[in-house]
Amino acid sequence: MIEGIVIKPLTVNADERGYLMEMLREDDEIFERFGQSYVALNYPGVVRAWHYHKLQTDHFVVVKGMVKVGLYDAREDSPTYGQVQQVFQGERNNVLVKIPVGVMHGYKTIGVEPSLLINFPTRLYNRSEPDEYRVPWDTPTIPFDWSLKNG
């Protein structure tokens, strides 16, 4: 597991009316601060990768569909530098994934329906100076396989 990645199990409280699932609370151990929240709709098979931040921590929750999250530790001073990790999250695995500063990340919608990913970054998005640093999703410098595993 990559240093600083936290996976928080989420509890679904369901009854005859539907369900309620808390995602992130200010009294959670992993909570740092609130910057903003946003939702991203993603079509099946689409890969949104790779990027990292120098200032903000991300908190991913998938509330519809399923995604495969790819993580790569690009922090040269980290004990897990160069390691990759994958997390499957969504309706079949309700978890929050905390992604610290400097960890490259992205995700792919898996299955046959779109996914809805909610992020709670710790910083407000700055349109004039975005805290986003990108490399192509298929870069050979990150040893991560986005393909579907059969067998």
Image (cartoon, rainbow, N blue to C red):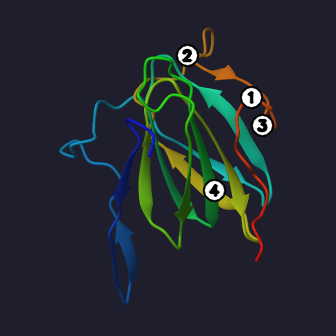
Nearer-the-camera pick, 94 or 37? 94
The type of residue carrying mark 4 is Lys
Whichever of labels 2 and 1 marks the residue nearer the N terminus, that label is: 2
Tell me the number on the disc at residue 141: 1
Nearer-the-camera pick, 96 or 129? 96
Q: Which mark lies nearer to you, 1 or 3? A: 1
Image x and y of residue 2, in percent = 45, 40
Whether residue 106 is situated above or below residue 56 in the rendered picture: below
Whichever of labels 4 and 3 marks the residue nearer the N terminus, that label is: 4
Q: Which mark lies nearer to you, 4 or 2? A: 4
Whether residue 100 is situated above or below residue 61 in the rendered picture: above
User: Whole-Å distance between the Cαs marked 2 and 1?
Assistant: 28 Å
Image x and y of residue 129, in percent = 60, 9
The residue depicted at 50 percent of the width and 21 percent of the height is 75
Q: Residue furthest top?
A: 128
Tell me the number on the disc at residue 68: 4
Whichever of labels 4 and 1 marks the residue nearer the N terminus, that label is: 4
Q: Residue furthest bottom?
A: 16
Give the left or right position of residue 83, taking residue 51 as reference.
left
Q: Which residue is mark 2?
A: 126
Q: Secondary structure at mark 1?
A: loop
The residue depicted at 80 percent of the width and 58 percent of the height is 45
- The image quadrant of residue 64 is bottom right
Image x and y of residue 146, in percent = 75, 51
User: Whole-Å distance between the Cαs marked 4 and 2?
Assistant: 27 Å
Q: Which residue is mark 3?
A: 137
